[in-house]
Image (cartoon, grey):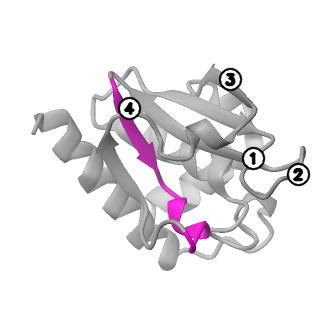
Amino acid sequence: MNAWIDQAILVLTDFRAKVNRTDLRGLAGFASFPDGSCQWSSYVVAKMLRDCGQDGWLGVSGTGGPRDTSEETHFWLQRDGCTLDPTADQFADRFSIPFVRIGPHPMAKLYEYIQVVSVDDIRERPAIWTAYERIVSA
C-alpha cells in the first residue's frame, strides 16, 4: 500500500481518538457525532492531512441519497482514486467504522448528484476552524 494511504489511515485514527476526548459542545457540526458530522469532519481531517504534508484531498458531496429524500446528503474525501470517509459509521446498516479505501465510495452510486469541492478553505469557515483547533489540541 502507498505510504500516503498508510498515513491517511493514521490521521483518520488520530482524528477519531481526538474527537472522542474533545469537548465539542456548542459546535453544530458535531452535535450528534458521527451522525450529521460528515462535512465538518471531512474538513478537519483534510486539514490534519495537510498538516502532515498531504495535499490534494478533495471533498465530495453527494445529494439525494440512500434514505430516499432529496435532502439526504453525505460528504467524504477523495484523492488519486482513494476514498476517506471519517463518518461512514453513521450509516450503521452499511459500515461499522470510518474508512480509507482504494476506489470510489461504495455509496456514491446511491446519490443523485455528486459534486467535488475544495476543502482547503477551512480558515474561511470559522465554526469548522474552531472545531479543528479544539480537536488537534486534544
Which one is nearer the viewer's eye here, 93 or 38? 93
Q: Residue at x 34, y 62 (%)?
A: 14
Picture disc at residue 115: 3
For label 4, count other residues whose C-alpha is less than 10 Å away and answer few (under 14), some (14-19) or many (20+).
Answer: some
Which residues lie in the magenta part? 81-93
Give left or right: position of 86 versus 1.
right
Label 4, label 2: how many angstroms apart (C-alpha)?
34 Å
For label 1, count other residues whose C-alpha is less than 10 Å away and answer few (under 14), some (14-19) or many (20+).
Answer: some
Picture disc at residue 50: 4
Q: Does the stretch in magenta take in 76?
A: no
Label 4, label 3: how many angstroms apart (C-alpha)?
21 Å
Q: Does the stretch in magenta take in 82?
A: yes
Label 1 SS: loop
Q: Residue at x 45, y 61 (%)?
A: 137
Label 1, label 4: how many angstroms apart (C-alpha)?
29 Å
Which one is nearer the viewer's eye here, 24 or 73? 73
> Do the CB atoms of the residues marked 2 and 1 lie less than 8 Å apart?
yes
Question: What amino acid is found at the position of numbered circle 3 in the picture?
Answer: Gln
For disc 2, the marked residue is 69
For disc 1, the marked residue is 65
For label 3, count other residues whose C-alpha is less than 10 Å away and answer few (under 14), some (14-19) or many (20+).
Answer: few
Q: Residue at x 67, y 70 (%)?
A: 24
> Do the CB atoms of the residues marked 1 and 4 lie less than 8 Å apart?
no
Report which quarter residue 31 is drawn in: bottom right
Label 4 SS: helix
Q: Is residue 42 above or below residue 91?
A: above
Q: Nearer the viewer, mark 1 or mark 4?
A: 1
Quadrant location, the C terminus: bottom left
Q: Residue at x 52, y 68 (%)?
A: 89
Nearer-N-terminus badge (3/1): 1
Q: Nearer the viewer, mark 4 or mark 3?
A: 3
